[in-house]
Amino acid sequence: MGSADPAAIRVPVGPDAARWTSRRVHGRVLLVVHNVTSAGRLLDLLPLFHDDFRVQLLVTSTGSSAFQSGVRELFAELGLPVLPWEQAVATPVDLAISASFGGELHLIKGKLCVLSHGVGYTKKLARPGAGSREPGAGSREPGAGSREPGAGSREPGAGSREPGAGSREPGAGSREPGAGSREPTFGLAPDWLLEDGKPFVDALVLSHPEQLARLRRVCPEAAEAAVLAGDPCYDRMLAGRPYRQRFRRAWGVRRGQRLVVLNSTWNPEGFFGNGGSEDLLPSLLPRLAAELPADEYRVAAVLHPNIWYGHGPGQVRAWLDRARRHGLVLVDPLSSWRQALLAADVVIGDFGAVSYYAAALGTPVLLAAAGDERLDPEAPLADFVRTAPRLDPHAPLGAQLERALASHRPWRGPAEFVSSAPGGSAALLRRSFYRLLDLDEPTAPALLEPLATPPYEPPRRTAPLRVRARVRGRRIDIERSAEHPYAASGEGHLAVHEETRNPSDLALADVIVREGTPDDPRLGGPAHWAAEVLERHPQCAVAAYITGPDTCTAYARQHGLLQLSAGPEADIDPAAYASALHAWLNAGGTMPPEGTTLRVRTAHGTHPVVAEFLTASPRSGAAGR
């Protein structure tokens, strides 16, 4: 792992470890991490060893990946004993588990189990040393010695479907051997599976029989090591489906809003990359903000960990700064991307595994980058990429998204081929692991960790919003977007967050907003803050202090201090309350002493907003200016 590699540990392994350990164990399980991407799949597996006092978990990194950033932080969070690679290959273990073929895995002294860290084995990659980039895996140097497999034959999981039985719809079409490039498939070719002509893995975990069929064609020597065990990542998503609305609320998606998830794999031909025919993302992001009204859409981005850690989280945030100020949420690439897929209404993606998982979950997918040359043409993912609808980056975006939603029919192919045992991977994997460990399985059910609810992250739009409003009595039709909304009519005004990047925006704002707690001493409370804003910005008509997901305090010049709150049926951004109030007052509306209820209409519904006078007194002098 470099010059700053940790020293060899003495506990719980080492020459004199028995002197210092508190418990003797019957099985050592070494988790082999190539990079953060592959570590994500290993994290899925950890609960299968929970509560077993017979097993000691250890972790190491091969150091072979170009993407080393984030690995040390991950190890620190795990809290497991970390072995330097040199110590790891010198220490006998009972089972080593890797989610990548990167590094000199054949040197490990113990049974070796390898599983995919994506949606099966799909990417083409020449043998190590040929100069090709790896699909998030790294290289393994061949020829450094061999190790005889020690597990013998294992029967693939019973009850699974054989490929080729019956017809498949688009996205799961037939695969013709010999079509396309003969470049080997990463993880399913002799280049990766054999050492000195012999298999060096004791268990090769496959998620579907179609992978076994490909394996038997291209590397029959390794077929006996195959174990069909489904997909634990997909199973965690299936188990999380009942909590879809909870995940949506975590990102501030309101009733009737569409959540658009952008996702990209890591290489230059991906959606985020600029190695394809067109550099899409930089031009697409401003259009998403401008063309998708703020009260109708929420946009999130799921970027491959190799983008996140390869370029650096700070750099990614800097590149996407304007989009983030328009409300884009960057989803944690390790802990929350599955929840984002479950929450999504539509996904704009590429040829990476995330797009295929989204399709398997039944979510509409538009491909912004195909990357056919990167894929094994016989893999189901390649079928999906060939037939999935494409995003036209030059056509109106909102219309394309609505068409995708209206015309979508769930693909049978991805749902069929992502796993041979939906919901059953935990039991199959644990059975295989304990067979390799030569230990009896625990009697408790094999269970995976449920997906955590992400932290609450509502949209925080600090870029100015242009508002168009049409007032008819107490009903106000409103649209807010970065540019003039595409289909709105009526009067326009400018709403600006107090923390806008450009202070000159505030000098033009009709409505100024900010969020905060009612008792924030720095701001002096909502009334004090609002009066201060009106005094500082004489052109501003309404200052709105948002105190919660459905409430705000607004000071309307010449009208007074008001509390705006959602009625029982409302679900809309409180900043929209303030714009609706301004439009209504500007059109001649008057506030009766007992207050009133405005009916604020956006594209996805009408929302009752209650406006009531507050007795709190702002600073003198601001009201009449």
Image (cartoon, rainbow, N blue to C red):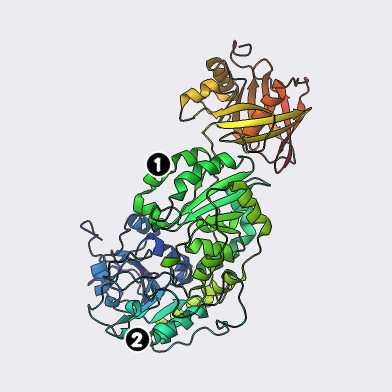
Q: Quadrant of the N terminus?
A: bottom left
Q: Is residue 296 above or below residue 165?
A: above
Q: Indicate which disc residue 318 carries.
A: 1
Residue 303 or residue 364, whichever sits in front: 364
Q: Which residue corresponds to the image point at 64% horizontal and 65% vertical from the top-left?
A: 410
Task: Identify the element where label 1 is drawn.
Answer: helix
Type of amino acid under label 2 = Gly
Type of amino acid under label 1 = Ala
Residue 452 visible to an observer of this rendering: no
Q: Position of residue 524 (x, y in %)?
A: 54, 23
Crowd rating for badge 2 (residues with CA inside 10 Å; few <14, some 14–19, many 20+): some
* Of callouts 2 and 1, the N-terminal one: 2
- Residue placed under numbered mark 2 in the picture: 150
Q: Position of residue 398 (x, y in %)?
A: 61, 47
CB atoms of marks 2 and 1 within 8 Å: no
Residue 300 visible to an observer of this rendering: yes
User: Which residue in the rendered view is the most extreme toward the left?
Assistant: 3
On the image, which quarter does residue 341 sit in? Answer: bottom right
User: Which residue in the rendered view is the most extreme toward the bottom?
Assistant: 153
Q: Is residue 562 above or below residue 315?
A: above
Q: Position of residue 283 (x, y in %)?
A: 47, 44
Q: Which residue corresponds to the image point at 38% horizontal and 82% vertical from the top-left?
A: 202
